[in-house]
Image: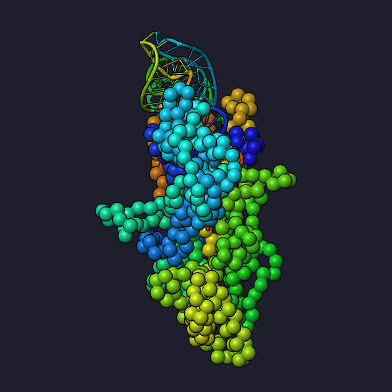
Amino acid sequence: MADPKANDLMERLVSLCKRRGFIFQSSEIYGGINGFWDYGPLGAELKRNIKDAWWRTMTHFRDDVVGLEATIIMHPQIWRASGHVDTFCDLMVECLVSKKRFRADQVDAQSGVIYFYTGAKDAAGKQSNDAYSVLLAPGKNPESARKVAKQFYQQRGLTEPTPEGERTEKVENSIRYNPENGSLLTDPRPFNLMFKTYVGPVESEDNVAYLRPETAQAIFAQFKNVLETSRQKVPFGIAQMGKAFRNEVTPRNFTFRSREFEQMELEFFIKPDEAVEAISGTVAKPAGPGHPGEPQPNWGWQMWHQYWVEERIRFYENIGLPRTSLVEYWQKPEELAHYARATVDILYKFPFSKRDEKGELMGEELEGVAARSDFDLSQHQRFSGKPMIFFDEELKAAWPKLDPAKQAELSKRYFDARSKYLIKTGEAPEKAEKQAREDAEALAKGYYVPHVIEPSAGVDRLALALIANAYCEDQAPDEKGKMESRIVMRFHPRIAPVKVAIFPLLKNKPELVKKAIEVRDLLRPHMNVFYDEAGAIGRRYRRQDEAGTPFGVTIDFDTLGEKPEMLNTVTLRERDSMQQTRVKIDELVSLLLQKTR
RNA sequence: GCGGGUGUAGCUCAAUGGUAGAGCGGUAGCCUUCCAAGCUACUUACGAGGGUUCGAUUCCCUUCACCCGCUCCA
């Protein structure tokens, strides 16, 4: 990260983003707001193209995934079931001197003598009336309490303060003081990374709601409705894109970690391995790395997980991120969330990424592909009291044909998995066992809570990756053939904000302008076009290079028939190579569609 | 949250305790037959608030934002 060149590159990227209208600081005229960014004209197009590509790939091009668009504010119980309220609402205390933060319930109890102060004064006559206190272990020098108190009052703007009103008191097992330096801690306060709001006019605890910190939970909450209306059967997926909000401690690295951001998430529901085995006899295991091919009935969670990892990497390659710019990172067992069986992060090597010991960029997360077992649906089943089960006719038909030993083995495995889950969630052992036994009996009749594979990607991170990847400074000849540096955004045509720019060679020749407008109107229904007639043609080309427009079409006198054999042909200029070819206007639409889809 | 750095025009950068300047860009016009040409005009800034001062963009304080490191990251 201490790489000054990388930092330069990021600065040039940020500068270009603003100059060309990709990304602006939110609320800039008021000084900006930390962790929020806006997309300008080109950025908005880029983002839209990213989302369109994802949506088409994930839903339109598949039979087994359907879409959902849920609200940002949902019933607060959803965030209890998901675990977000608990993990986000820890009571935290902070040291008043070192600012170090502790979980309130994890501060070690201290015994000793408390030195109370009523305030302090300094030589310049400045005064603080803030009460403060320090706890010292028995027998320690009172001077060290005064030292800590001095630090405290210094932070309140006093120079060389003298603490006043000292008084002492013995105390046993207090958790109000920092075990490391004895300083008083703040009162416990909730430290919540979810944005909170109130539904309705009354700001009471009953009305608290949260802006969703991820889009995924709505998919689980609507699982039954989608299942019943979509005519889908497990395995199938539900896709959703949308805004999510996290009150990040430290927004960093331009838009990479923002407080408001957009996600593209798929929850792909699969049969538990026990059901797969009952139906297919065996559960297929990955033969090795790489794409496992078309989905098969005997796939368990491992195959499906690998499938989605590889599908997602293909997606990134398809919109122009080379395989070499990506890193496939398998989370280590100790990094996994407790309910996750495996998670693969797909990383992009950003300029600001840290480097490993070999000096290689390690990459930052664009997407996580998690195998989450049946945790999420089970949680919502427990919290809502509504069944989140799927009736699997294949399983029901297959089960009675199994020999009893196999039935017993599968039942036992399913029972173990279910009871493990239930005990982890804090159910009493007897109750957990009873419930798990019911679940295992239901399995034999064809009922189960589906497991899920979750590919979850960040739109803004991907936009930033595409911008970083596209940014290129190369050498191009000017009018006189002298080489000068050119900034060009080499976006893949699929996601480029503008697909083609249309230029009349000269602005002051009405017949050229008229023809150019005709061509613009011809292309407009098919793709995003940009018409530009101002200034020299070279300048207009270069402007489009910085916007990342992959093609330019120039209308000249030959188009109008100055050389009769070239009537109704135009110059097609390609951004990366700067090569020009002569093409017929009639062929433009199909040629450009082919190159930009 | 802590520590360090930086805030002057759309961008890159000057200068100054006394009316803020350039290059590039943008807009309009003239000109211009394929890679940031030329000429003319126009456009726009001291991040915000407070203090010191006759006067502050400049000095001081506070604050906000951005960058870097630490911390955090379901």
Side (left or right) of A199 relative to A32: left
For residue A127, say whether it is visible.
Answer: yes
Using the image, determine if residue A436 lies above or below residue A115: below
Using the image, determine if residue B33 lies above or below residue A503: above
Say which quarter of the image contains residue A474.
Answer: top right
Q: Residue furthest left?
A: A201
Percent of width and height locating residue A103 = 51, 53
For residue A228, say whether it is visible.
Answer: no
The quadrant the N terminus of chain A occupies is top right
Image color mode: rainbow
Residue appearing at x 64%, y 80% in the figure: A282
Residue appearing at x 59%, y 42% in the figure: A140
Residue appearing at x 55%, y 44% in the figure: A136
Percent of width and height locating residue B34 = 55, 30
| Residue nearer the viewer, A335 or A331 | A335
Residue appearing at x 59%, y 44% in the figure: A139
| Residue nearer the viewer, B52 or A188 | A188
| Residue nearer the viewer, A192 or A597 | A192
Using the image, determine if residue B17 lies above or below residue A516: above
| Residue nearer the viewer, A98 or A481 | A98
Using the image, determine if residue A157 lies above or below residue A286: above
Percent of width and height locating residue A490 = 57, 42
Say which quarter of the image contains residue A13.
Answer: top right
Percent of width and height locating residue A319 = 56, 51
Side (left or right) of A204 relative to A152: left
